[in-house]
Amino acid sequence: MLYPLVLIALVAAPVALLARFPGRERIAWGLALIPLSIFGLTLALAGPVWEGGQVSERIAWVSALGLDLSFTLDGLSLLFALIISGIGTLIVGYAGHYLGADSGLGRFLAYLMLFMGAMLGLVLAGNVLTMFVFWELTSVTSYLLIGYKHDYADARRGALHSLLVTGGGGLALLVGLLLLGQAAGSYELSDILAAGDLLRAHALYPAAVILILLGCFTKSAQIPFHFWLPGAMQAPTPASAFLHSATMVKAGVYLMARLSPALGGTALWDVTLAVVGGATMTFAAIVAMRQFDLKAMLAYTTISMLGALTMQIGLGGKYGAEGVATNILAHALYKSALFMLAGVIDHECGTRDLRRLGGLRAYMPQTMVVTALALLSFGGIPVMFGFVAKELMLEAALETELGATMSLLAVAAIAITAVAYLVTGWRLFSSTFLGQRSLAAMQQHVTDPALGMLIGPGVPAVLSLLIPLAFLGPISGLIEPASVAIYGKPIEVKLALWHGVNPALLVSLSAIVIGFGLARFGEHLANLRGWPAWSRGDMIFDRLIERTLAGATALTRAIQEGRLRRYILITAVTMLIFVGVPFLSFGLGSIRLDLDPQLQFYEILAAALIPIGVIATIKARTRLGAIISVGMVGAMVALLFVLFSAPDLALTQLLIEVLSTVFLLLVFSVLPVRFESFSEAWVRRRDAIVATVMGVLMGSLVLATATNDAFAPLAPFFLENSLEQGKGTNVVNVILVDFRGFDTLGEITVLFIALLGIYGLLRLRQGKGDATPERVTATEPAAEPVDTKR
Amino acid sequence: MIILLAIAIGSLFAGATYLVLRRSVVKLILGLIMLSHGVNLLIFTMGDGVRRGAPPLVDAQGQPPAGAADPLVQALILTAIVISFGFTAFVLALAYRSNQAVGSDDLDDLSTTDRL
């Protein structure tokens, strides 16, 4: 009974539209009961998981493709599902306050519910293809949420960037997952995880790993794809807090963690993850330190933490697995709180620029306390949950099996990151709450927000303190099955605040000391000159898009320049290449060119008159000559039908030929008598060459296929069944009206439509909107001088 | 025999390709007519061999004559002949109208609708 978890959220999306009506705060808290019920239901279903088991179910979908809706709830899924529904509850309620004045809240919450369903589907999926469907759905809903304020160009740009980057990564991921499925022989996660040794030795392994990692790195904003996440901050803050820090961006981390028991343990996987993750973690932490926009600052710290999670998966080992699980939870708690607090400050002060904020301690004391709690956890200060998580990260770096160099580098990177976090946290706190009272705050009569708006950030911030103090035991029970799923082997997890004096604690403490020492200089660091603007990823990406579009436009202009003959020429040449090249490389097959003993002279004559008629048509200088020549060609075709056993065809052909000629004479009587030579000589020569090659190709095609016995003809069936099933002796007629009667119906329809078209064209002449050339020339000069005469 | 048909079909396709690449509306239409002849003959050769004197007519017992021609391709061509006639008639009416409106046989003069 796992699919209801996904279904409830998806079905709730239209219900969320209710929030467009006034009284939005209360409606939103009412809607928050939906994720809360999912939270409760998940806990109720999770029974076997605490004991180290899992819950699975499967609904047949497209079984032939190995595509089943199968869901599995194990430790890792449970951790994610609880975070998604738990944080989701708070976010939905918080959004009611944040967007209380916006009638678009209904739409916003509908998107949010859709996202929640997709994200739950992603983490509960027991089949990689099912998972991929939900993966893409999260990208799409994220696009909708970032572009929520779609009348702003920046919002559209941010939304498009995130969609293109994560969508492009999604394509790579799909191919990677298909390769993985091919190698493992199944798309079920349980089968893939069981086939670890087989997979690592498989020839497809490197390609599959690289493609899957591309998908994960784009989704989780790893270098060099990190730039879309700061752009995604254009989303309303509740969405940023939910999607772009707590849940969606962790989808990549989730997938890497999920697959690491099967794919990990090789240099390709471990070193790539450790290096890319470590680089992202350090780089983003340093960039975050220098931001002035509250949300941009938080976005970069999120990228940094995603890098840290990736790195820990790469570092591996027991502590790596424990560290990933613990850090996911700790980060979800403090970072969603911080984002919601940034939203509170933005909402109350009308700005989130650190240079325009300050002195808020007097106006917003409650907000300050909550922020301080969340920031302490973020900075990894002892007794906060963030500290417990950071200790595990350091343990993972110290105990890694990737060698001493890697271990040393990782410890150094974590230490630098920890220092940068402290500087960032202190800058955020001091620029907002301490110092001089800002103009923005004084003008707006800033106060603490309504209690309902503080519940959102308050709950996770307080949990960040309460969990290590009171609930480490129960939380260990949640972290343990998750760690087991990441590690792939049973381990025992006992989270603790105090591990005794060990290297991890020493590194952690020295980082805290250095961090507080440097914190005073945070402002100076931020004001230092940075890299030039063009080197930023989003600028480069914009230019890439521009170039692609310009290239596409140029190509379209070159191919589709608006003249029919250009299109025909391109079509003909393309056909010559695609049919001619295989023809030349494979040859014509076994052509039987034995002379026909029954060949009659009149057959030769009829066939020979066709090329002569064609040449005469082309060479004709007058329209009458052309009509006669083309008529002769038609007559010779009819004659060939007579000679080669097709009396019905000959009859029809002759009839139609006469009619066509009459029509031609009728219409051509109004056209110029003589043909003009419009084209230049070289164009005619070029066309003649293309035409000749086309003729030779088609002629050879006839020779190659007509003398080929590779396929059994269909004719005997019709000949044998004509009388019995169709009640007729003329087999051609029986086919037309019986065996293939619908074709004939279609043919009649086509004729009727052509008739309607002709009727319309000729009748239009009498219409009042009609302008004959005479009238055009009569009215054109008159249009101008009207005013001057007056 | 088949080589004769191959030459005829090849020349029809070559002539049609050359004519549809011309700027004159009249030549374009002639090219289309020629193309339909070429395609019809092409289908004709794609059946169960091209035969003399054995039309696909069965006797009262439902027995076909020895070596009867392929009836399926003939049915397909019959449909094709009629449809290409409908198409030709439509294109001719279109040419008639456009010549009335624009007064030119040059396709390039049709690139703008300002004169309509």
Image: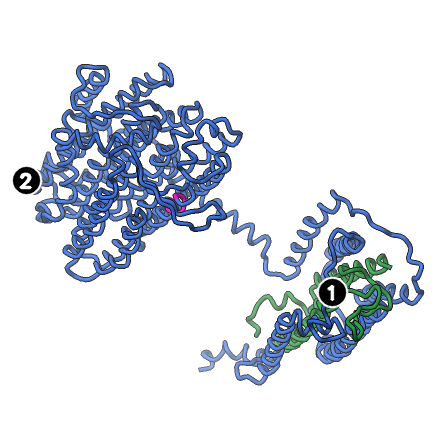
Q: Chain of mark 1?
A: B
Chain B rendering hue: green
Q: Is residue A622 visible?
A: no
- Read off the residue under disc 2: A362
- A39 and A383: which is toward the camera: A39
Which chain is the one coloured blue?
Answer: A
User: Above or below — where is A328 with respect to A720?
Assistant: above
Task: Say which quarter of the image contains residue A396.
Answer: top left
Give the vertical position of A749 relative to A468 (above or below). below
Q: Residue at x 42, y 29 (%)?
A: A263
Q: Quadrant of residue A377?
A: top left
Q: Position of residue A702 (x, y in %)?
A: 78, 56
Judging by the rendered image, the residue that carries numbered circle 1 is: B73
Q: Secondary structure at mark 1?
A: helix
Chain to which mark 2 belongs: A
The answer to whether residue A250 is left or right of residue A786 is left
- Position of residue A455 measured from the top left corner of the image (x, y, whole percent): 13, 45
Kind of residue indicated by mark 2: Ala
Mark in the foreground, 1 or 2: 1
Q: Main secondary structure of the magenta part?
A: helix
**Helix, strand or loop at disc 2?**
helix
Q: Which residues are magenta?
A: A131-135
